[in-house]
């Protein structure tokens, strides 16, 4: 047998050994069955398509460091793609002390909330999620959000989270 023949036989044997080693450990992967999945591998090397964490609901945040003051149109954010806003939640590292922190979020300069606005009660660092009205929830990648601080309440280091699909 020539050197080339031996090399081909060795490669075939190694390939057969590798196939035998992983037989039954990995399903035929093909393409993922839905968008939003990535290829994942376990510690033992078994790979599969899994949903991306948060693929059903993502979030983005607008951060405003320092002592809050009443202001309009701060911290502009553009979505990464066409989205549907779900809810808005306000947080602050320093909780409000004199009155509730109240904000409004604007989409392209138009307030999302008419009556109830996202708030943070005195002494609290996290507010409750406030659902975005359905008529204002759809956004394109060209749309943007800004935040109005209506009543700072003595809070500082605010973070506003927008959850979306």
Image (tube, helix red, strand yellow):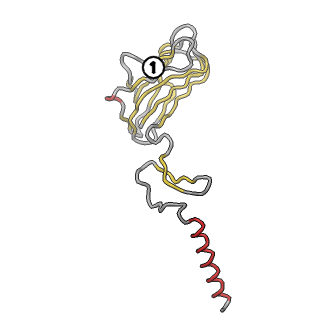
Vertical comparison of 159 with 11: above or below:
above
Q: Where's residue 165, x and y in %?
A: 41, 38
Going 54% across and 11% down the picture, which residue do you hit?
A: 122
Quadrant where the N terminus sits is: bottom right
Category of crowding for the residue at label 1, using alpha-carbon neighbours closer than 10 angstroms: few (below 14), some (14–19), many (at least 20): many
Quadrant for residue 47, please give it: bottom right
Q: Where's residue 105, x and y in %?
A: 44, 24
Q: Is residue 72 visible?
A: no
Extreme bottom residue here?
Answer: 1
Under tag 1, what secondary structure? Answer: loop
Q: Where's residue 154, x and y in %?
A: 58, 12
Extreme top residue here?
Answer: 98
Extreme left residue here?
Answer: 135
Quadrant for residue 63, please give it: top right
Going 52% across and 29% down the picture, which residue do you hit?
A: 62
Q: Where's residue 118, x and y in %?
A: 45, 19
| Closer to the camera in the image, 91 or 73 | 91
Going 50% across and 34% down the picture, which residue do you hit?
A: 60
Q: Is residue 20 visible?
A: yes
Reading the image, the residue beneath label 1 is 118
Going 51% across and 42% down the picture, which residue do you hit?
A: 53
């Amino acid at each position: 047998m020539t050197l080339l023949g031996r090399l081909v036989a060795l490669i075939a044997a190694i390939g057969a050994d590798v196939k035998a080693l992983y037989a039954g450990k990995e399903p035929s992967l093909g393409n993922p069955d839905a968008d939003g999945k990535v290829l994942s591998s376990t510690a033992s090397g078994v790979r599969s398509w899994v949903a991306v964490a948060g693929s059903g609901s993502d979030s983005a945040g607008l951060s405003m460091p320092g002592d809050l003051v009443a202001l309009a149109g701060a911290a502009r954010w553009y979505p990464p793609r066409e989205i549907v806003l779900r809810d808005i939640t306000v947080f602050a590292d320093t909780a409000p002390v004199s009155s509730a922190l109240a904000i409004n979020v604007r989409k392209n300069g138009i307030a999302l909330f008419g009556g109830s606005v996202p708030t943070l009660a005195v002494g609290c660092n996290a507010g409750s999620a406030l659902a975005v009205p359905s008529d204002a929830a759809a956004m394109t990648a060209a749309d943007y959000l800004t935040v109005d601080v209506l009543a700072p309440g003595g809070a500082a280091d605010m973070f506003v989270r927008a959850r979306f699909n």
